[in-house]
């Protein structure tokens, strides 16, 4: 399989790095002024993170100084915050350096010119500094798509690790707000959200808008629309995963593609995480095609699943378009309602193992046109140790059965599905059932016109 190209233009790097126009230094009209502006995190990063920092030098009149002005970077504690100005991109843009979180603690980062210097205190958050290790998790089946007021989803399919509930509010046709009570993101914490349409009319697609805190709660906006892009009411499943919720010894990563003008991110955002190294390279390889490189996850395990959910208010839909496990690349692809590739935002997840002592499973299939397509062993795992089998019911519709993963009394789970590889298509849940010892997921995939389509998929079950 050819490796997806990583296209990360230098111009994009400069567009991505936040920068500030610098004010004149009061009372010193002949001196340069300088300032450091960080991308996203502003004053804190995590151990293993790499962040591009940029300083713009202006003269006393507020105009950019000559680009040959020498900028020297310094860290008060290189063992905590390292600076690497000599690594790519090359040639290094003027006033640019990489900032690397090496160990938990604090350090002052300073940029010097001949006439002035400016400093920033940076806190590096270690993996054990966030209590209780960011083990947040929540999920729900939003099962009342036309309910007039807020409701609580069926408790059988709802979990919130805060110990409080989940409510869903319908704002208007196809627009919902999911309130995960008491699960707000605390300083230093990170989270990922995935969503899937459930039991909906042909071609229905549900997606996210950027999730956020509201006091002590986490708010997740969800938008559902038909294949033609028109909003429609729909049921859906939603999964919120904190950075440290799954087995800490197992590789886990996620990221949210940032605004469309950005072409490069070694990302330390609150919605990105890499449990192995902290490093996440992001590149736009073409219109609607994005590469997420999770450094350190190169062939981390023989089993993993990749998930993707579109983000935004329009009719874009996204999928896991490709991958390269040798260099730890997850490639997302996004298309508009017309099926044409388009730039969009998306949330992706690299999942290898669920919570210790809890059921989980995932699967993808090969040869989806077959009546009983074999599962792809790289992308299939069943925590029960039982077999995973699939069966094609009709065009674009399958069942996937996880032997021994049936729901014990008092247990619950959720299911997420993503379109996987092939051509432009989307996949939704039809249902899942726990019959005896086994758990069976039924799903349906559609092409851009909303017609049933034999496309590949990736299904994830999490208790």
Image (cartoon, helix red, strand yellow):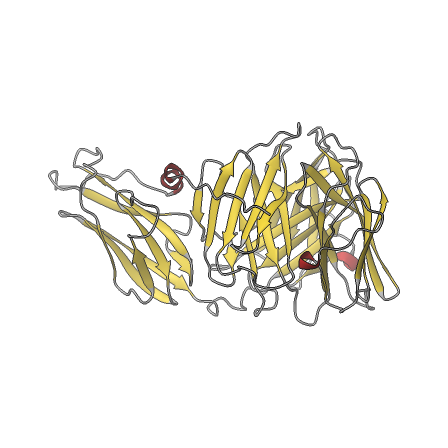
Asked whether 144 or 302 is in front, the reply is: 302
Q: Residue furthest right?
A: 436
199 left or right of 326?
right
Residue 247 x, y percent position in the rendering: 61, 68
Asked whether 170 or 48 is in front, the reply is: 48
Give the residue displayed 68% in from the left and 41% down from the top.
Answer: 422
Give the residue displayed 41% in from the left and 52% down from the top.
Answer: 41
Residue 161 in which image quadrant: bottom right
458 left or right of 124?
right
Is residue 169 at all visible to an observer of this figure? yes
Q: Give above or below for 170 relative to 228.
A: below
Residue 360 in which image quadrant: bottom right
Q: Residue furthest bottom?
A: 357
Is residue 233 at all visible to an observer of this figure? no
Q: Give above or below for 273 relative to 27.
A: below
Q: Quadrant of the C terminus?
A: bottom right
Task: Give the total of numbered labels.
Answer: 0
Asked whether 316 or 84 is in front, the reply is: 84
Residue 63 x, y percent position in the rendering: 21, 33
278 left or right of 165?
left
């Amino acid at each position: 399989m050819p490796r997806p190209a990583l296209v990360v233009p230098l111009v994009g790097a400069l567009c991505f790095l936040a920068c500030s126009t610098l004010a004149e230094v009061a009372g010193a009209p002949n001196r340069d002024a300088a300032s450091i502006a960080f991308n996203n995190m502003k004053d804190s990063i995590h151990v293993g993170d790499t962040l591009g920092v940029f300083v713009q030098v202006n003269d006393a009149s507020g105009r950019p100084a000559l680009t040959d002005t020498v900028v020297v970077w310094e860290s008060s504690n290189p063992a905590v915050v390292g600076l690497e100005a000599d690594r790519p991109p090359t040639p290094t843009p003027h006033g640019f350096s990489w900032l690397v979180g090496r160990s938990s603690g604090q350090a002052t980062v300073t940029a010097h010119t001949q006439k002035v210097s400016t400093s920033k205190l940076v806190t590096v958050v270690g993996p054990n500094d966030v209590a209780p290790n960011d083990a947040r998790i929540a999920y729900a089946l939003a099962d009342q798509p036309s309910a007039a007021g807020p409701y609580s989803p069926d408790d059988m399919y709802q979990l919130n690790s805060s110990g409080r509930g989940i409510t869903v509010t319908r704002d208007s046709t196809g627009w919902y707000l999911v309130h995960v009570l008491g699960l707000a993101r605390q300083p230093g914490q990170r989270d990922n959200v995935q969503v899937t349409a459930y039991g909906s009319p042909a071609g229905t697609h549900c997606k996210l808008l950027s999730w956020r805190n509201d006091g002590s709660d986490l708010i997740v906006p969800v938008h559902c629309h038909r294949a033609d892009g028109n909003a429609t009411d729909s049921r859906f499943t939603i999964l919120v995963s904190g950075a440290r919720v799954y087995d800490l010894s197992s590789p886990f990563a996620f990221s949210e593609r940032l605004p469309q003008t950005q072409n490069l991110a070694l990302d330390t955002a609150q919605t990105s995480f890499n449990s192995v190294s902290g490093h996440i390279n992001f590149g736009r390889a073409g219109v609607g095609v994005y590469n997420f490189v999770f450094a350190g996850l190169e062939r981390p395990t023989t089993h993993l699943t990749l998930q993707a959910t579109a983000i935004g208010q329009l009719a874009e839909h996204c999928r896991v378009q490709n991958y390269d496990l040798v260099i730890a690349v997850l490639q997302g692809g996004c298309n508009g309602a017309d099926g044409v590739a388009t730039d969009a935002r998306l949330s992706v997840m690299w999942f290898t193992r669920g919570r210790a002592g809890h059921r989980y499973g995932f699967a993808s299939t090969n040869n989806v046109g077959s009546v009983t397509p074999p599962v792809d062993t790289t992308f299939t795992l069943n925590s029960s140790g039982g077999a995973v089998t699939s069966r094609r019911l009709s065009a674009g519709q399958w069942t996937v059965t996880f032997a021994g993963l049936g729901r014990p009394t008092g247990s619950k789970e959720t299911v997420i599905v993503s379109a996987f590889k092939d051509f432009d298509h989307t996949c939704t849940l039809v249902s899942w059932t726990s019959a005896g010892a086994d758990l069976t997921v039924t799903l349906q995939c559609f092409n851009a016109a909303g017609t049933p389509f034999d496309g590949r998929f990736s299904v994830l079950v999490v208790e």
